[in-house]
Amino acid sequence: MVHAQAIISSYSVDDLDAAGEFYGETLGLTVTQDEMGTLGIDWAGEQRIFIYPKEDHTPASFTVLNLLVDDVDAAVDELNARGVTTKIYGDDEIEGMPNDEKGIVRGSDSTPEMAWFRDPAGNVIALLKR
């Protein structure tokens, strides 16, 4: 068994400045830039998200980050007010999980309420009801 001392997740972006502004100002997360030219988002305790620049970046075809929130509607409304599009999937794109005009899947016994949006590099981020 691996006994990890901390958890660090990572993914790439094509524009580090745009990513820093988006994650720091639009999402309100604590973002730092280190001497290597990468971004860090510090999460609870020793957990960290590591974002690095990649010239030939291709957006991930899956969700790279899940943000747990108490109120998905309020979070979506706030993001929409900041210019972030949360309706990124059509009803036919997520089988069995139709979403409303705001892009929110209303949840069921087997799925939480959730919505998705993209960062400036096209990576998919999810809001999930806590």
Image (cartoon, grey):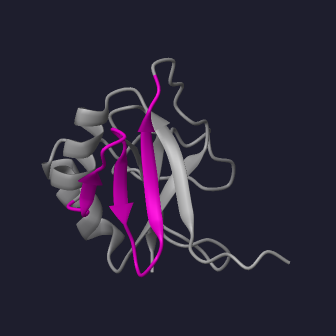
Q: Residue at x 55, y 43 (%)?
A: 91
Tell whether 109 sits left or right of 84: right
Query: Which of the image's four quarters has the C terminus?
Result: bottom left
Check the image and name the residue furthest to the front. 35
Is residue 126 visible to the viewer in this orientation of the structure? Answer: no
- In this view, the residue in front, 109 or 11, is 11
Q: Where 130 falls versus 120 (above or below)?
A: below
Q: Position of residue 104 (x, y in %)?
A: 42, 58
Q: Residue at x 30, y 44 (%)?
A: 35
Tell whether 116 sits left or right of 41: right
- In this view, the residue in front, 95 or 83, is 83
Check the image and name the residue furthest to the right. 1
Tell whether 27 sits left or right of 104: left
Q: Is residue 14 magenta?
A: no
Could you say which quadrant of the image residue 112 lies in?
bottom right
How many numbered callouts? 0
Q: Is residue 38 magenta?
A: yes
Is residue 42 visible to the viewer in this orientation of the structure? Answer: yes
- In this view, the residue in front, 26 or 39, is 39
Tell whether 4 sits left or right of 119: right
Q: Residue at x 42, y 45 (%)?
A: 51
Q: Position of residue 98 (x, y in %)?
A: 55, 52
- In this view, the residue in front, 30 or 100, is 30
Query: Which of the image's four quarters has the N terminus?
Result: bottom right
Could you say which quadrant of the image residue 49 lies in?
bottom left
Q: Position of residue 12 (x, y in %)?
A: 48, 37
Q: Where 3 falls versus 35 (above or below)?
A: below
Residues shaded magenta: 28-54
Q: Residue at x 50, y 24 (%)?
A: 57
Q: Position of residue 107 (x, y in %)?
A: 54, 70
